[in-house]
Amino acid sequence: MKKLKQGCDLSTCFLCKRCLPEWLPAVEANREHLAFKKGAVLFQEGDPVHGIYFVYSGTVKVHKQWGEEKELIVRFATAGDIMGHRGIGSEQYYPITATALDAVTVCFLPLEFLKTSLKVNHQLLYDLMLFYAAELQTSEKQMRNLAHMPVKGRVANALLQLQEKFGVTPEGYIGLSLSRQDLAAYAGTTYETVFRLLTELSGEGIIQHAGRDIRIVDAARLAAFTTA
């Protein structure tokens, strides 16, 4: 981790866009700009909560332990996203881990200042409440999928979600290159199953893959597996 002198312009991140103009000098005085290298852990599951993170650039995987030797990727955070908010509650321990997938810069806000900001900035409080509600709905869908959706549907759903969030490259590949292990953790399955299903989907002409890069050729057929 490295502290930076420059970062957010006080007008584009989730926090700054919702704060009163007269509150922005206080934000500037209390925030920290931090840079993390690829593979660095921003915070660890079980650590005490020190504050909240607003992603400025780069991609972070947000994950938690799932069994003794497995992990489940809850989501991916990129520019404009919030991290660490799940630890703000009665226990105030991070329930997840955040790991940088590439070079990442964030704006860090200490917990006590965040609480003060919420009391002062009603728009921030209201929008954060809506954000929590939307994320709760997404988490409930993920848990339902893990319990009821066949594994092929979960892998198909993971690919579609990744393309929706990260878009595609000029060559048509999903805009995030993931290891098979991370894709398995996101879909809630095993490396071996993901490898087999990607080969199967490729053979059916539904996707193409080259190394870590995956291109969805037939989104409609892929989506059909999520409703079977």
Image (cartoon, rainbow, N blue to C red):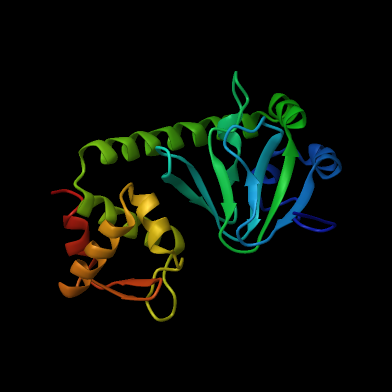
Q: Is residue 209 visible?
A: yes
Pick the residue in front: 46 or 91: 46
In the image as oriented, which residue stretches furthest toward the bottom? 171
Total marks shown come to 0
Pick the residue in front: 44 or 172: 44
Q: Residue at x 75, y 26 (%)?
A: 116
**Residue 176 position in % (x across, y down):** 46, 66
In the image as oriented, which residue stretches furthest toward the top? 90
Q: Is residue 156 left or right of residue 38?
A: left
Q: Is residue 199 left or right of residue 100?
A: left
Q: Does 220 appear above or below 30?
A: below
**Residue 5 position in % (x across, y down):** 85, 57
**Residue 228 position in % (x across, y down):** 13, 49
Residue 123 image-quadrant placement: top right
Residue 203 image-quadrant placement: bottom left
Q: Residue at x 26, y 57 (%)?
A: 193
Q: Residue at x 53, y 38 (%)?
A: 96
Pick the residue in front: 77 or 46: 46
Q: Quadrant of the N terminus?
A: bottom right
Q: Does 37 appear above or below 22?
A: below
Q: Residue at x 57, y 46 (%)?
A: 98
Q: Is residue 28 left or right of residue 196?
A: right
In the image as oriented, which residue stretches furthest toward the front? 68
Residue 220 image-quadrant placement: bottom left
Q: Does 218 appear above or below 13?
A: below
Q: Is residue 81 visible?
A: no
**Residue 163 position in % (x across, y down):** 38, 62
